[in-house]
Amino acid sequence: MLREGLAKAVDLVTEHNRLTLVVMVVVSAVVLAGIPMLDTASQAGADASAFEDIDRVQKANYVAANYDTSRNDSNRTVATVYVRQQEGDVLSKSSLLATLRYQQDIRANASVATVLHEDGIVDIANMVAVALVDDRNASIDEQIAALDRADSETVEAQIESTLANNPQALRLLPAGHEPGETTATDRRLLVVLNATAGSATAGDAVDAALYDTAQAHSDSGLFVLNQFAYNAYNSHFFGEIVWLVLPAALVLILGVLAFTYRDLVDIVVGMTGVILSVLWMFGLLGWLGVSAGLVSIVPVVLVTGLSIDFGFHVFNRYREQRGVEEGIREPMNRGVKLVATALVLVTVTAAIGFLSNVVNPLGQIRDLGVSITLGVIASLLLFVTVVPALKISIDGLFERVGWSRRKRALGHGRFLRPILSRTVDLARRGAPVVLVVAIVVGSLGAAAWSDLDEESFQQPDGEVAEWKQQLPDPVGWEPHPVAEQLNHVQDVYQPATADDAIQERILLEGDVTANGTLTDLQAGVDTIEERGVLLEQPGVQSVTSPVTAMRAVAQRDPAFRAVFEADTRDTNGDGLPDRDLETVYDAFYEADSDTASRVLERTDGEYRSMFVRVTLDGGYADADETVADLEAGAARMDGGDRTATVVGSLAINVAVLDSIVGGILQTMALALAAIALTMAVAFRVMHGSATLGLVVAVPIALVLGLVIGGMYLLSIPLTLLTALLMSLVIGLGVDYNIHIGDRFADERREGKTTVQALEAAVTGTGGALLGSTLTSAGAFATIALVPHPQLQSFGSIVVIALLTAFLVSLLVLPSLLVLWERYSPEAVTMVSEETPLPQD
C-alpha cells in the first residue's frame, strides 16, 4: 500500500514536472505566509506541574501556602550602578566627580526623579562630598562644586576617613578590599527607589534611564546590569552568530557539496530544496503558533543537514539508475521510488525521536522538537516533489542544447569505492568479532552516564578567542562587555542588599515541639555559616529563623523574654530553651503573632512546621556545592520525628536536574522501543521481514552509548538542556541505518547475494551518507565558534551523534546484516519475475 501510493505520487511528479513546480510554488507561498506570524519569544520556562511529584517541589509549595515568603517588606527597591577602572582608581577625585555627574544626569530624568526614594543615591562620592561641604543636605550641584574645588590630598584624606568611619561605605567596595586602602579598581553606587518603581511601566522607564545614562558615561567606567543591558547583549550575541557561524557553515556546506556533487547545477537545485525546507519550517511554525525561541539556530542547522542528506540520496540514486542510453525522466522516476520509502521511514522514525520531547517540562525543548519535526517533514515533501521536478526540468533543458548531464554517483569512484568496500570484507570475514567489539565499546560508553558531571547551568564567561576577534568585519566576533561584566561582578562583590542575593529556604516538619528542637536548628544554622555560604554584609541579616525572630522579640518584650530565657527551660546553658517548647511558642505568638507566623506554623492550636531563610553569597553557577552545604546544615536540624528539607530555588533546580537525568534514560528507552516497533512493522510490510527491521534499529542504542562516552571524554556536562537534548540523538542516529538497511533489502529482493547486496548498499548509499555526514557534522561543528558553553556542548553532542551514526552504519550494521542472513529464519521477499525491480 505504501509503496504503491508513493509510486503513484512519484509518477505524477516525474511525468508532470512543470505542473508539479507550479503547484508547489503556490503551496510554498501559502506556507511561507506564516513567517510574519512567527513568535520569536523565548519559551525557556518549565511547567511547574511537571515536577509536582518531586519532594522538594511539594515542600516548597507547602511553604508558599503556609508562610509569607515575601523578601522585601520595605517600601523601596534598590538598583545598582557599577564603576570599574582596570588600570585606574575609582576612588580618585576624577572618578568621584564622574559618578556625581552621573547622578546629576539621572536625577534630571523625569522617570527617575518621580520614583527616587528619600534616601536618594548611596555613593562614596556623596559621602566624601557632603563631608567636604559640611552639610548633610547639600544638593548634588553643591557636592560637585565642593569636590571640584578640593585638592587631591584633601580628597584622599576624606576618603580614608569615610572608609574608616562609615561601614556603609565598605558595602560599596569589593569583598576583598583591604582595610585602610584608599585606592580601588571597583566600586558601586545604589540608587534607592520607591516601591512603585517595581511596576512594569515605571520599572522599564527607570531601567532605561539608568542604562542609557551609564552608556553615556561609559568612558568613566560606569555600567549597569539590568534588563536593557541584557537585551543589548542578546541582540549583539545573535547578530554576531549570524555573521560568524552562518557564513562559516555555508562555506563548509558548499565546499562539501562541490566535492560530492561535482556539479554546479546539482548544488543549486539541492540548495533550493534546503532553503525551502528551512523556510517551510518557519512558515509552519508561524501558522501553528509554535515559538521559534532563542535557539532557532539549532533547528535551522539541523534541518539544513537532514535536508541535504535527503538531497544526496535522491541525486545519488538517480545517477546510479541512469543507463548509458537513457534520458532523464525514467531514471529519476526509478531513483526517487527506490529512496522514497527509506525517506518516509527516516522521517517517521526521526519524528518519533524528536517528538519524544513534546512531553518535556521545558517549553524551549518542546518547541525545538516540534520545529525539527516540521522541518524534516517539509524536507521530505520538497525532496520528492520540487527537487526531482526541478532537476528534470533543468537537466532536460541543458541536454536539449547539447550539454550532457551524466555524472558518476559518489561512492563509485576509484578512490572511495575500495575504501567503502573494505567494510563489507570486514563484515564477511569477522562479523561476530565486530559485533562483540561494538557491544563492549557501546557498553563502556553507556556506563559513563553515571560519571558525567552535572551542572544546573553553563554560564558564559564573556571571553572570546583572539583569532575570532581578528577576523575581518563583519565576520569577526566583537565581544560585548555584559557577559564579562556579569562574571566580574559575581566574582568581586557580595550582593549589596538581601534582595539582590539568592535566598534559600529550609522547612522543618514533624515534631517541632520536641526537646532540643531549637538547639538542633541553631546547630544546623551554625554548620551552614561555617561552610562560608552566607552573605556577610554590614547591616544585612543573613539568617531568619525561629531563633532569630524569638531573640528579636525578646529584646523588646520583657514578658516573652522571661519565658524565653527561663533557666528551667535551658538545661545546657546555650541560651536557647530546649524544654517545654510549646509554652515558649505560645508566648511567642502572644507577644508578636505576625512575626511568629513568618517562621512557625500553628494550625488549629498545633505547631506543625518551622521555616528558616538564609541569604547566600553565591549564584546558580555554584548551585551544586551550595545546596550540598545547605543539606549538611539541614541534616543537623533533623532529629526523631522531625525532618528538615532545603526547598529554595537552588535546591529545586538541583532536584529537577536529578529528576530529568533519572527520567531521560526511560524516555530514550521508550523512544527506542517505539522506533524498533515502527521499523519491525515497516520492514515487514515493505520487505516481508520484521526481524530485519529490528536488526536495523539495534545500532541506534549503540550510537547512544557512544555519544554518552564521547560526552565523558570531552567533559561535556549534563545540564537541564544537554540531558533533555539526548533524545534528539535518537532522531539523528536512526537515519543512516535505515538507508543502508532499506538499500540492502532492495538489493536482496532483486536476487543478489548477501555480499553483493552489501556492496551495493555500502558503496552506493554509503557514498551519499558520507557526503551527508561531512555536511551535517561540519555545519554543527561551526557552532563551536560561538563563545557560549551551552551552545558548544549542544553542537558537540550532535557532531558526535552524526559521526558515530555514520561509522556504526558502515562498520557495525553490515556485520549485523550478515549474521541476520546467517541465522534468521526469515528472508526478504523476492520480487516475482512479472514485476522486476529496476537494476542498478
Image: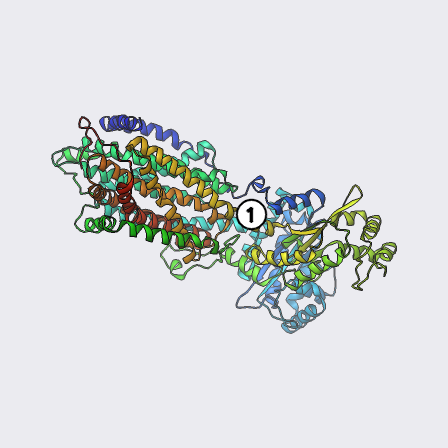
User: As drawn, is 526 to the left or to the right of 50?
Assistant: right
Q: Nearer the viewer, residue 470 or 256?
A: 256
Q: Nearer the viewer, residue 798 or 807?
A: 807
Q: Quadrant of the N terminus?
A: top left
The residue at which mark 1 appears reads as 656
Q: Is residue 271 something that shows in the picture?
A: no
Query: Residue 814, position in %: x, y?
Result: 27, 45
User: As drawn, is 640 to the left or to the right of 422?
Assistant: right
User: As drawn, is 734 to the left or to the right of 291?
Assistant: left
Query: Residue 724, position in %: x, y?
Result: 47, 46
Query: Residue 602, position in %: x, y?
Result: 77, 45
Residue at left offset 55%, top offset 47%:
656
Residue at left offset 19%, top offset 45%:
412
Residue at left offset 43%, top offset 40%:
671
Q: Is residue 398 above or below residue 224?
A: above
Query: Residue 728, position in %: x, y?
Result: 42, 44
Q: Is residue 172 something that shows in the picture?
A: yes
Colour mode? rainbow
Q: Quadrant of the C terminus?
A: top left
Q: Is residue 659 above or below residue 467?
A: above
